[in-house]
Image (cartoon, coloured by chain):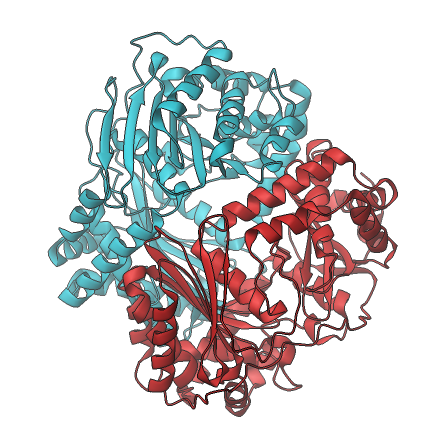
Chain colours: A red, B cyan
Amino acid sequence: MSLSSVVSLPLLPTPRDGGGSDHSFVAGDPGGNVVRRSVLPGGVRVLTEAMPGQRSATIGFWVGVGSRDEAEGQHGSTHFLEHLLFKGTARRSAMDIASAFDEVGGESNAATAKENTCYYARVLDSDLPMAIDVIADMVTSAVLDAEELEQERDVILEEIAMDSDDPGDVAHEKFVELVLGDHPLGRPIGGTPEAIMAVPRDSVLAHYRRYYVPSEIVVTAAGGLDHDVVCRLVQEALETAGWSLDEGALPVARRSTTATPVRGATGTHVIRRAVEQSNILIGCPSLTATDERRFAMSVLNAVLGGGMSSRLFQEIREKRGLVYSTYSFSAAYADAGYFGMYAGCSPAKTGQVIRLLGAELDRLAVDGIDAEELRKAVGQLSGGLVMALEDSSSRMSRLGRSELVSGEFVDMDASLERIRAVTAEDVRDLARELAAAPRTTVVVGPFDTEADFAEHEG
Amino acid sequence: MSLSSVVSLPLLPTPRDGGGSDHSFVAGDPGGNVVRRSVLPGGVRVLTEAMPGQRSATIGFWVGVGSRDEAEGQHGSTHFLEHLLFKGTARRSAMDIASAFDEVGGESNAATAKENTCYYARVLDSDLPMAIDVIADMVTSAVLDAEELEQERDVILEEIAMDSDDPGDVAHEKFVELVLGDHPLGRPIGGTPEAIMAVPRDSVLAHYRRYYVPSEIVVTAAGGLDHDVVCRLVQEALETAGWSLDEGALPVARRSTTATPVRGATGTHVIRRAVEQSNILIGCPSLTATDERRFAMSVLNAVLGGGMSSRLFQEIREKRGLVYSTYSFSAAYADAGYFGMYAGCSPAKTGQVIRLLGAELDRLAVDGIDAEELRKAVGQLSGGLVMALEDSSSRMSRLGRSELVSGEFVDMDASLERIRAVTAEDVRDLARELAAAPRTTVVVGPFDTEADFAEHEG
């Protein structure tokens, strides 16, 4: 039931044509796990990764629609719809849905993102058939009751109010909006309170009918499971719902990955809040999700702001004691993406910290990184990748993202190889591009204008 | 580097005398894992749980000192010290420590709690010797350099400022302070900004010398590991540091588990913040960590506020759409504990939501729970326990808490048995006690006094 923003991960599928394939493939990784992919009648894709020895499994039903797909007057509908799927189906009340997962100690939730929506659950392997049945029921047979919808409108307004009381969330949301300008990816996922108050049931219903169809659905699962059993259970659940599952129907084509020119608002933007810390974000548009340089971006982020040994942490926190938290990040979508640096500091140090963040990016562009930094960053990304994949939720997500974004799964060895192939020159070239781009700066703090903190030199 | 608050978990060791034992024990659980415990020379305890098939391991060095142990004028020293351990040792700079974990993709951090401090890392199994060496070096040989200390003072003030910009954190901290009154457990872990600005290096140093000694140290690890190897590596690391490790030295005795009478401040307390949501907490003192009724408390929390099917979620969110988030919780320490209910709602609904929270607790006390609710809660706790233990970090934490709190490890089967033994009467009796206790209510919202929201009836 949450708003999701995805930052770049060292999960590195290579692009190919993702639509129209009905073959299965099998890929292995050094952990002994096997990935299998099948296309069911109707074009429903199922990807699984059996993890021997796991007693639990994580399953996700992905729908290839996100906030970027909303038409004018529908903003917030994707997230609204996601909430409503928990409010009851032809066969189940909201309480039935909640109880099904609670009574087995499972975790179930959903996340609406800019390019997809995912309903997921982690349960003991013996409860996987239940999880598939319940989530398939929600995805295929939600009632979208008019009275429940009005009730849920208030809940969503509370969710938005909660996020707007978090100065870090406010800064991130505003940052993305400004950096991506009028690109549909720039809009807040949840919609504005005004949009949520206005959205009519018809537009939520239209959204549901248009996108919750077999060819848009990707089911991914990882953990203690059997691929053929998962495929059979998914197909049975969709048949029970009365979905028409034509043999030979094809999955929808992937989104276009041609980069869209982005025209954002540069310069410094201030949002006044009565807070004790300034929340600062500085960045610019950057790579798409299939850009070959995304591996170099992962290395760049590791060196610049990816851990306690990173340059931002060392320069701004360790040497100067100006912040508790500082890092860099990037997010990549089909046709656009962005890069940013964050710091939270005392209001009086705002001007100084903004200059330090900018200076570190400039230094990276001028001096590049040395062999030792490259070696450490590759070690960091490689070790992190191997550890993340011990968790069935991470594997479930990786399967979903690789299918939806690139159409091809790349196993761990191939991913590690791509990370290891990054050179110091690749990173410096990318840093030069980022440093040369006009910057967008967002400050959420006790200020009315930039002049209020520009004077407070550290 | 964080402030930790621990809420009750379904991890249920039985009490016994924890000091003075130098034998090893072995316990198994249905997952095929084996727990082993050894006491090394000097009284250092080592508990491990080998998890066959895991490629990573989590290791924690626990010190049996927390914010409750701080004398007047030392408030915040425990957390301050925790930060300083990352700033350098005789053999390593701050950058060396940070790099050691970053370059292998490991996650390392520390958490200061009210009754203990834990330094931990999750790394690939092949990096476990490195992790033990680095953390042992930090625990035994920190320099506590005077200049670094001044720098870190600012970082900690930023951490406190960040937390104070989170209205939920502010409400929780104030709630605990009021419920536990002048009990040392009531104090905020990080200290106040005034205390942090004032704390002298001598008191941090005294704290380090007094508590960072062999008999206070508990090392716990879980994942891909071998118990004997972990014991050998820990012992070698402590010897390298020059710690005196007397054969036959005993671990310190556990804290007294005799309940301390708590005299908190009841009634309603308002903290004004310019926020869009009221953050409400209502509760009272409750069970200690070794109270036999803690199993009933887990069931009570599951039924009242433990998931989407819980009474609070159903009554306040699903039926009335008044909140996005609501739940109940409890926290238990050696000689005191507390119970609470949380909700975040629109300021205009504050009075109504306070009444609804109280009414649900009262209803639980009057009507108790039915057999179906009991069955579901037991299923929820059991499934959650099994799933949590797939993660090496959870197992590492469980070993540490069971050793420090009760002195005995209880395997999963025994834990499940204790949960299943809870009756509906146990839960109703506990609910009666909680409902009869004078309540403390904290509201963080756009109000000056209780009268401001008491008028806004829903």
* Residue at 41% across, 42% down: B54
Compared across the picture, whether A409 is left or right of B398 comes to right
Rendered-image quadrant of the C terminus of chain B: bottom left
* Residue at 33% across, 75% down: A133
Is B428 rendered above or below residue A158?
above
Q: Which of B183 and B92 is in front in this view?
A: B92
Q: Picture coordinates of residue A285 (x, y %)?
A: 77, 63
Q: Nearer the viewer, residue B67 or B423?
A: B423
Is B237 rendered above or below residue B153?
above
Is A12 rendered above or below residue A210?
above
Q: Picture coordinates of residue B382 (x, y %)?
A: 25, 54
Examine the rendering and report whether any part of residue B79 can be seen.
yes
Rendered-image quadrant of the N terminus of chain B: top right
Examine the rendering and report whether any part of residue B444 can be seen.
no
Q: Picture coordinates of residue A209 (x, y %)?
A: 50, 89
Q: Picture coordinates of residue A296 (x, y %)?
A: 73, 51
Q: Name which quarter of the figure residue A211 lies in.
A: bottom right
Q: Nearer the viewer, residue A229 or B263?
A: A229
Q: Name which quarter of the figure residue B153 lies in.
A: top right
* Residue at 48% across, 64% down: B452
Q: How many marks?
A: 0
Is B203 rendered above or below residue A191?
above
Compared across the picture, whether A28 is left or right of A431 comes to left
Compared across the picture, whether B74 is left or right of A257 comes to left
Q: Which of B94 and B192 is in front in this view?
A: B94
